[in-house]
Image (cartoon, rainbow, N blue to C red):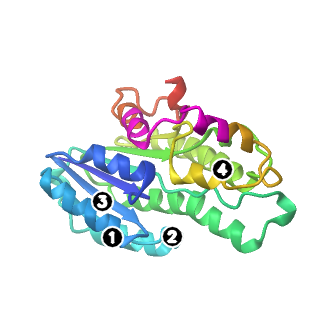
Amino acid sequence: MRLYVITGASRGLGAALAEALMAPGHRLICMARSQAPLASLRKHARTRGCAVDALAIDIGDAAAAVAALEATMNKLDPARFRAVSLINNAGVVEPIHTVERLLPTEIAASVAVNLTAPMALTAAFLRLTAAWPAERKILNISSGAAHKAYAGWSVYCATKAALDQFTRCLSLEQQRHANGAKVVALAPGVIDTAMQASVRRATADEFAELPRFVALKESGQLPTPQAAAESLLRYLERADFGATPVDDVRNA
């Protein structure tokens, strides 16, 4: 059996990842703030012979998210799983405006979701599975914004760059262990999700690259969450997963 832990699973890319992974022999632990979509996801999974633990939790509260994950995974029998994967997908693009307009609460909220939560959940995942015989993988959903600066996206760019560097450090540490986790921070490209809709609602004063992102939508160049999820999961199953700790699915 394979176990997948997915954050931000109630909509967009996270929901598409969960949908694609619903299969007999898979067990999912799905984390998101919204209870209703999670309940629907769990019901749908049962029709496909896939067990789902739906955890309605705001991962912006890292301590609560870790506690929920620990409570769920501690009930599982490690001997049943041949592979376990953590997919740190949840993320926010806000705040979108220039630095002088940033508020401390906005900065803290973005850092909590985009950086603190994946770091804390990764640490918990590694502790919880340290003695498991299963192959372990961690996929951190990064962004091209980790490498390219955008005026108006300072917090988003900074948190994604930090997530990439965290992944590099983690990869070095895990290489020292006999059953170390294989880890990758992977940029999925621009996807047609609610996050992109939020970007397009910004003004040109707030986000200088607005015309480019509007054009991508209007010209039909944004892949669906389902197509993006398929690309990410193909990468996750590659034999060389982890060989390149920071990568872009468009270059793979």
* Res. 216 image quadrant: top right
Residue at 70% across, 74% down: 105
Question: Quick one: label 1 or label 3, which is nearer the N terminus?
Answer: 3
| Foreground of the two, 62 or 156 | 156
The amino acid type, in three-letter code, at marker 1 is: Ala
192 up-or-down from 231: above or below: below
Q: Secondary structure at mark 4?
A: helix
| Residue 147 visible in this rendered orientation of the protein | no
User: Nearer the observer, disc 1 or disc 3?
Assistant: 1
**Between marks 2 and 4, how big is the CA–CA gap?**
29 Å
116 up-or-down from 162: above or below: below
The amino acid type, in three-letter code, at marker 4 is: Arg
Q: Is residue 88 magenta?
A: no
Q: Position of residue 236 (x, y in %)?
A: 38, 36
Region of the chain picked out in magenta, as a range = 214-231
Residue denoted by label 1: 36
User: Nearer the observer, disc 3 or disc 4?
Assistant: 4
Q: Secondary structure at mark 2?
A: helix
